[in-house]
Image (spheres, rainbow, N blue to C red):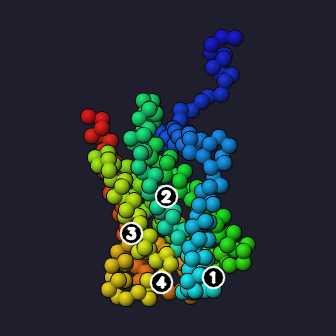
């Protein structure tokens, strides 16, 4: 068989687009990161579910012993979960930006792998892991008879989408800032502790004194929590919730972080 006959017999292979190549690289890096973090037997995944379950159960028992009732509804377990889950998703996703550029120097030796691919793979893996864990947490709460299923799906989807934008944008900022300030991770973790107490996780912001409310209202995660809770509590209205402010954060942090990532990339190429 001649070369021309062989070429005609074989199906023509179209060259892959740049987006298709990047998608393959990102999924390969996600698989690599999954194996390194959770092990080849995937036994690390149950811990991603057990950790938020233990936190929610511990805090619920603590407030029960303090004879504190849920501000709305009959289950403090569900009330705390609807506040803690959005905070947890944002916290864990945004933290994955640290080390994305500094700890993947070996894979950057391959021309096909870009630093942004490593960052994106870490963010996507963490975000979807947290979403799966969140779904299982609410299913467990529902099976225990404490509610747990959303009454309205649309607000929940909006909240999850905005969490994805915020988590991606802040994680990218963390990865870029860490290049110039190695100790930035320590300061950011302290900020996460402050966000825990100002995100409305175990209280309703509308019931706070106006002096305190005027301070916590600057926290965008507080508005995500308020939006998320409307999916579980029919008729829940929040005077604190500001959709325009939340959208400004979600759609503002992404272009800023991408611009900074481009500056970092060019500076490292020089």
Q: Which mark is residue 92?
A: 2
Residue 196 position, x and y percent, is 44, 70
In the displayed structure image, the side of residue 252 where residue 19 appears, left or right? right
Regarding residue 233, the answer to whether it shows in the image is: no
Residue denoted by label 3? 194
The percent position of residue 166, horizontal first and vertical second, equals 43, 62
Disc nearer the start of the sequence (3/1)? 1
Determine whether, in the image, residue 243 is placed left or right of residue 65: left
Label of residue 204 in the image: 4
- Measured in 3D between alpha carbons, the distance from the residue under mark 2 to the one under mark 4, in whole angstroms, is 23 Å
Number of marks present in the image shown: 4
Specify few, some or many for label 4: CA neighbours under 10 Å numbering under 14, 14-19, or 20 or more. Answer: some
Marker disc for residue 103: none
Q: Secondary structure at mark 1?
A: loop
Task: Tell me if residue 267 comes above or below residue 127 in the rendering.
Answer: above
Residue at point 35%, 83% (across, down)? 212
Image: 2 above or below 36: above
- The mark nearer the N terminus, 1 or 2, is 1
Disc number lying in front (3 or 4)? 3
Residue in the foreground of this view, choosing between 73 and 268: 73
Q: Label 4's element?
A: loop
Q: Earlier in the sequence, mark 1 or mark 4?
A: 1
**What residue is at 56 percent from the left and 41 percent from the top?**
36
Front residue of 215/163: it is: 215
Residue 163: x percent and y percent? 48, 65
The quarter of the displayed image where residue 216 is located: bottom left
Crowd class of label 1 (few under 14; some 14 to 19; many from 20; radius 10 Å): some
């Amino acid at each position: 068989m001649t070369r021309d006959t062989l070429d005609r017999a074989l199906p023509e292979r179209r060259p892959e687009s740049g987006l298709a190549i990047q998608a393959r690289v990102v999924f390969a890096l996600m698989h690599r990161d999954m194996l390194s973090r959770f092990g080849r037997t995937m036994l690390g995944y149950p811990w991603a579910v057990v950790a938020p379950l233990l936190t929610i159960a511990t805090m619920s028992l603590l407030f029960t012993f303090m004879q504190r009732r849920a501000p709305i509804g009959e289950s403090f377990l569900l009330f705390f979960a609807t506040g803690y889950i959005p905070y947890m998703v944002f916290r864990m996703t945004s933290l994955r930006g640290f080390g994305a550029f500094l700890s993947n120097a070996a894979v950057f030796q391959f021309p096909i792998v870009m630093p942004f691919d490593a960052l994106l793979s870490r963010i996507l893996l963490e975000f979807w892991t947290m979403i799966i864990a969140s779904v299982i947490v609410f299913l467990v709460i529902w099976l225990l008879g404490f509610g747990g299923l959303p009454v309205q799906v649309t607000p929940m989807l909006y909240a999850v989408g905005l969490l994805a934008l915020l988590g991606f944008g802040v994680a990218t900022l963390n990865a870029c800032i860490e290049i110039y300030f190695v100790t930035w991770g320590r300061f950011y973790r302290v900020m996460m502790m402050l966000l825990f107490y100002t995100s409305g996780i175990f209280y309703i912001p509308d019931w706070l004194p106006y002096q305190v409310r005027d301070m916590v209202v600057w926290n965008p995660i507080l508005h995500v929590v308020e939006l998320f809770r409307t999916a579980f509590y029919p008729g829940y209205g929040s005077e604190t919730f500001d959709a325009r402010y939340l959208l400004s954060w979600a759609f503002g942090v992404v272009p800023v972080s991408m611009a900074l990532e481009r500056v970092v990339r060019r500076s490292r190429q020089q």
